[in-house]
Amino acid sequence: MKSTRIIGIFVAVVLLLSALGCGGGGGRAALYGKWALEDPTSGMTLEFEFKQDGTLTIGASGITFDMKYEFVDDDTIKLTGADMLTGGETAEMDFKVDGDKLTLTVEGESQVLNKVK
């Protein structure tokens, strides 16, 4: 009887932690919001805003441009109209959110952005 209760509590805790996304965060919803990439050499800050409607706004020094993105899977997005960034019409980008850090990886090159609060 006691072991059944302990197993029940254990299962409930595991389910709760899974539902809350305990750990490093991540997933689609974690991508939404504003992120900043600071270039220590130039002192310029590039801001990325991922909106839930699939729009990505990128801006620096008062200049902004929009493109569209869609999720390929839970850690990859496809950018459309990204020719300013990639030289092509579309590009795929892997992402990982860990707390207030967003790592974007394109063709093996990674950049770490900080959450704008």
Image (spheres, helix red, strand yellow):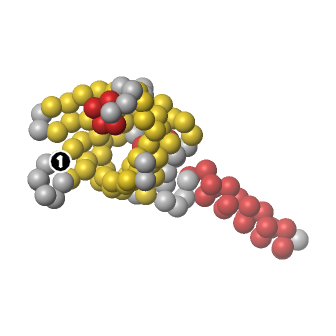
Residue found at x 18% / y 54%:
39
In the rendered image of this protein, does residue 10 appear above or below residue 56?
below
Can residue 37 be seen at all in this image of the molecule? yes
Circle count: 1
Residue found at x 44% / y 42%:
93
Q: Residue furthest right?
A: 1
Residue found at x 43% / y 53%:
108
Q: Residue 28: x percent and y percent?
A: 50, 41
Residue 93 vs residue 48, the one in the foreground: 93
Q: Quadrant of the N terminus?
A: bottom right
Q: Residue furthest front?
A: 87
Residue 60 vs residue 108, the one in the foreground: 108
Residue found at x 50% / y 42%:
76
* Residue 88 found in image quarter: top left
Q: Which residue is mark 1?
A: 45
Can residue 52 be seen at all in this image of the molecule? no
- Secondary element type, mark 1: strand
Q: Residue furthest bottom?
A: 2
Q: Does residue 100 appear left or right of residue 1 in this picture? A: left
Q: Residue 109: x percent and y percent?
A: 38, 53
How would you rate the neighbour count of disc 1 (Cα within 10 Å): few for under 14, some for 14-19, many for 20 or more?
some
Q: Does residue 15 appear left or right of residue 45 in this picture? A: right
Q: Residue 48: x percent and y percent?
A: 29, 40
Q: Amino acid at mark 1?
A: Thr
